[in-house]
Amino acid sequence: MGNAKSGAVSKEILEDLKLNTKFSEEELCQWYENFQKQCPTGRISPEEFEKIYDRFFPNSDAKAYAQHVFRSFDTNDDGTLDFKEYIIALHMTSSKTALKLEWAFSLFDVDKDGYITKSEVKEICQSIFKLIPKEKQALLPSDENTPEKRSDKLWSYFDKGDNERLAEGEFIKGVTENEDALRLIQYDPQN
Ligand SMILES: [Ca+2]
Ligand SMILES: [Ca+2]
């Protein structure tokens, strides 16, 4: 413990992650050790990330959703997740109490232009819908039981025309003020 060994996580990244996540230094070092074992290259590819999601959603098709999540955490746009991006992802998605809304915004902002359009909402709703096992899809209310209906319903909470777009503040305000909207931007397998 505490000895700087080759291959250890850099002090700079460690300090940064301690500041920006709920993880302690010990936890982060443990994560790093696991990360290096599973990813000797130090980079997670989209395919590896999809496999992680497959394990969480064995009864549904998580591929499209995993690709969107991957994109939202690949902050430097190099097509891989490094340790820092991976830990931020873990921190954002493992939070049980509140979904991190800034992250949710970046998930929906598919082309990363700082706004969410109705077609982006539709694209993410389609990937969320695929996370829902077939038998649970059958139990959905009639205004949410297709990806199109789900995205129309979600979009209606933001009071925007079909060709208008949502800024981050408007998105966060909309889902904070409306429980239904908050529920529709995610899929919780426990429910
Ligand atoms: Ca990256
Ligand atoms: Ca956008």
Image: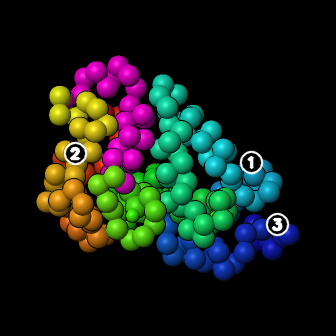
Asked whether, in this view, residue 63 is left or right of residue 157, the answer is right
Circle 1 crowding by C-alpha within 10 Å: few under 14, some 14–19, many from 20: few
Q: Quadrant of ligand 1?
A: bottom right
Q: Can you tell which of label 3 and label 2 is closer to the viewer?
A: 2
Q: Amino acid at mark 1?
A: Gln
Q: Amino acid at mark 3?
A: Gly
Q: Quadrant of residue 172?
A: bottom left
The C terminus lies in quadrant: top left
Query: What secondary structure is marked by label 3?
Result: loop
The residue labelled by disc 3 is 7
Provide residue 50's location: percent of width, then percent of height. Answer: 60, 42
Q: Specify whether tag 1 is near ligand 1 (CB below 8 Å).
A: no
Asked whether, in this view, residue 167 is left or right of residue 86, the answer is left
Query: Which residue occupies 73% across, 69% down?
Result: 9
Query: Which residue occupies 53% across, 61% down?
Result: 73
Query: Which label belongs to residue 163?
Result: none
Colour scheme in the image? rainbow
Q: Specify whether tag 3 is near ligand 1 (CB below 8 Å).
A: no
Q: Specify whether tag 2 is near ligand 2 (CB below 8 Å).
A: no
Q: Which residues are magenta?
A: 120-141
Query: Which label belongs to residue 152?
Result: 2
